[in-house]
Amino acid sequence: MAIAETTSITMMGLSDIIRCSLLVTVCLSPVAHDHLQRTSDQEPRRDGRFAVIIEGVGGEPVYTQRFRNWTHAMIDVLGGELAFAEDHIFYLTASPTETVTANTARATAAEVRSTFERLNTMVEPGDLIFVFLVGHGSFDGQQAKFNLSGPDLTAEDFDRLLDALPTDNVILVNAASASGAFIKPLSQPGRIVITATRSGYERNATRFAEFFIQAFKKEQADTDKNQRVSLLEAFTYATRMTAEWYERRGTLATEHALLDDNGDHVGHRGALEGDGLLARTTYLDARPLAQAVDDPILQQLLDQRERLERAIEALKARKTEMSPTAYEAQLEKLLVRLARVNQSIKARQKR
């Protein structure tokens, strides 16, 4: 049967849209499946995940070593637990005395720009970009910067670099001091921004990066027990462990991490006021072994479902900014597409 039934769906309430979307699953044509079959036969599945790890200048030996340890630890996690391809990890370091990855360069403004230019030639729409900054930051009340060898890069500089990428699926974690001032310039719908501090005026060296990295290796960070650590779970774990680090030392906490993933230019300490919905369904890892499949067509369908679920969460985060008509129209389209993919998954799993 053709899928003409879907065109008769009119503007309805949310519950009606969901019911209609579920009904669509019983009356789909095999066209999309045939397309996947041809695509799978022609090309192997590509890994569309890329990481840019930037180690800023330490200024003092203790910070130089600390920043290097943390960036190396992040790279180890990316190449290990998270199974990133080595040539998809870009490392910019203040002192490139050793080649840590296939793409290692000095952390200067020029090299950062060059790295993003290379990414533009490799990245496709829908790919995931993870940017991780470790170092010192500054804020003069007007402009936030990340400190590099030579000229620094501003939050606006990073925003332009991210905007030029052919994908909107971007995560930026700025674990530097004064990083909270990056939230407002970088905030966009569909983009996840995490900072170690709540403003540009928390200028002391931070500990957030250490615990954010740990989250991807600790079972207790996986609070929903789905064998994966989402960006929200990593943020929540790192925030809690950072607070405990200060408590154990009996000192006043000088950093308070923020997360923004709904594009409203305001960060929050957790899943509050619209933030956290997108981060809850965003993962850095490849599909874990428990969910991995040998069937390349089924794998593509599962990946499609994950992207659609992420798009739905991003849309929900923007609900208050949209008219009810526009919101329900976009939600309807996404739910119908999700229903089609779910039907194809069920059909494939029965083979």
Image: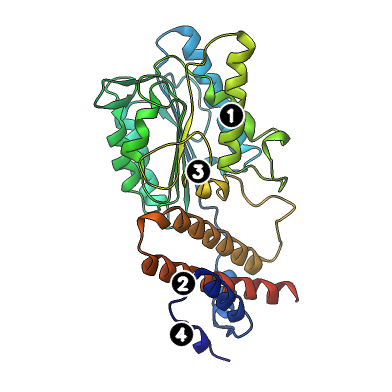
Give me the C-alpha separation between circle 2 and circle 1. Answer: 36 Å
Q: Residue at the spot x=56%, y=28% of the render?
A: 239
Give the residue type that dot 1 points to: Ala
- Looking at the image, is 211 positioned above or below residue 230? above
Camera-nearest residue between 78 and 226:
226
Q: Please tell me how crowded label 1 is: few (under 14), some (14-19), or many (20+) other residues with Cα within 10 Å.
A: many
Q: Please tell me how crowded label 3 is: few (under 14), some (14-19), or many (20+) other residues with Cα within 10 Å.
A: many
Pick the quarter of the image with the C terminus: bottom right
Secondary structure found at label 4 = helix
Q: Does label 3 or label 2 sit earlier along the sequence?
A: 3
Q: Does label 1 or label 4 sit earlier along the sequence?
A: 4
Give me the C-alpha separation between circle 3 and circle 1. Answer: 25 Å
Pick the quarter of the image with the N terminus: bottom right
Give me the C-alpha separation between circle 2 and circle 4. Answer: 10 Å
Q: Can residue 44 be seen?
A: no
Give me the C-alpha separation between circle 3 and circle 2. Answer: 33 Å
Camera-nearest residue between 236 and 293:
236
- Name of the residue lying farthest toward the bottom: 1
Q: Are marks 3 and 1 in contact (CB under 8 Å)?
A: no
Reading the image, the residue beneath label 4 is: 7
- Looking at the image, is 252 positioned above or below residue 182? above
Q: Residue at the spot x=56%, y=75% of the render?
A: 21
Residue 213 image-quadrant placement: top right
What label sits on residue 333 in the rendered view? 2
Secondary structure found at label 3 = helix
Give the residue type that dot 4 points to: Thr
Reading the image, the residue beneath label 1 is: 238
